[in-house]
Image: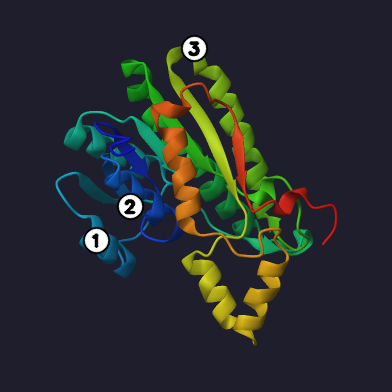
Amino acid sequence: MPDRLKGKVAIVTGSTQGIGKAVARLFVAEGAKVVLNSHRDDEHAVDVREELGSRDTLFVAADIADRAQVDAMVGKTLERFGRVDIVVNNAGMNVFTDPLATTEEEWRRCFAVDLEGAWNVSRAALGPMLEQGAGSIVNIASVHAHKIIPGCFPYPVAKHALIGLTKSLGIEYAARGVRVNSISPGLIMTDNIAAWLASCPDPEGERARQAALLPVKRIGEPEEVAYTALFLASDEARFINATDILIDGGRSQLYHE
């Protein structure tokens, strides 16, 4: 079904790599006008502009942890495209430490990006969405919001809270035409995961070990998350609200390793 997002305007944060880039690419292919975003204008931003740059896309460098920068990004979106129909809050950061070893800066930055950043973008977009009586916000959470892995603090705390934000906003604005849902990816072959595997003493062995942990016996691909974001963003999902969808190959349902 082509043009599933035809005529819609989407903001996709953290869209120069990994899942965010896959989402942006798919949204453009499905007819959306897409605002691309990263907190810095680097080589990844150059690459995504070369691939997706057109009159129907706009790149905005903005740190989602900074409310003023987010407000400016939404303002540029409205100035260029006249509306905001979809937000995909994908930008995030990993902070994996022992709880008592977590520094104040690590704690604050993790929540500033993974939770407050999603709220900053949602808050800025909600006004236009409510005014037009329609909108879809998709938050990229994590399997860490469902299952705890030791040594990964405080990331799962922020992602649990992100699902709480999803449900709260979804219920708050349901009767006014705005839907808010989240996606919880498991192990996905993003740029960061590929770099981590490459850093292991035995990259191929570690990749095989990680795949063996999953019921499907393979690592997920960013495009598989992107297609779920596409569905939730589209009118096909118009009766789905305040819901989280796990994309982890069934891993979180296992009783044992």
| Quadrant in the rendering for residue 98 | bottom right
Vertically, is 164 above or below 111?
above
| Residue with the most extreme right position | 256
- Residue extending farthest left: 55
Disc 3 versus disc 1: nearer the observer: 1
Residue 170 lies left or right of residue 8; in this view the side is right
N-terminal label among 3 and 1:
1
Closer to us: mark 2 or mark 3?
A: 2
Q: What's the CA distance linking mark 2 and mark 1?
A: 9 Å
In the rendered image, the quadrant that contains the C terminus is bottom right
Mark 2 or 1, nearer chain start: 2
Q: Which quarter of the image is occupied by the N terminus?
A: top left
Along the line of sight, the residue nearer the viewer: 201 or 120? 201
Q: Is residue 128 visible?
A: yes
Disc 2/disc 3 C-alpha distance (Å): 31 Å
Q: Nearer the viewer, residue 190 or 209?
A: 209
Residue displayed at 85% across by 57% down? 256
Please say if the residues under marks 2 and 1 sit with CB atoms less than 8 Å apart.
Answer: yes
Mark 2: few/some/many CA within 10 Å (<14, 14-19, 20+): many
Q: Amino acid at mark 2?
A: Arg
Q: Residue furthest top?
A: 175
Amino acid type for the residue under numbered disc 1: Glu
> Dot 1 lies on which element?
helix
The residue where tag 1 is placed is 51
The image position of residue 216, as x and y in percent, is 66, 59
Q: Which disc number belongs to residue 25?
A: 2
* Left or right: 24 as drawn, with respect to 229: left
Residue 15 locus on image (x, y percent):
37, 54
What secondary structure is marked by label 3?
A: helix
Residue identifier under label 3: 175
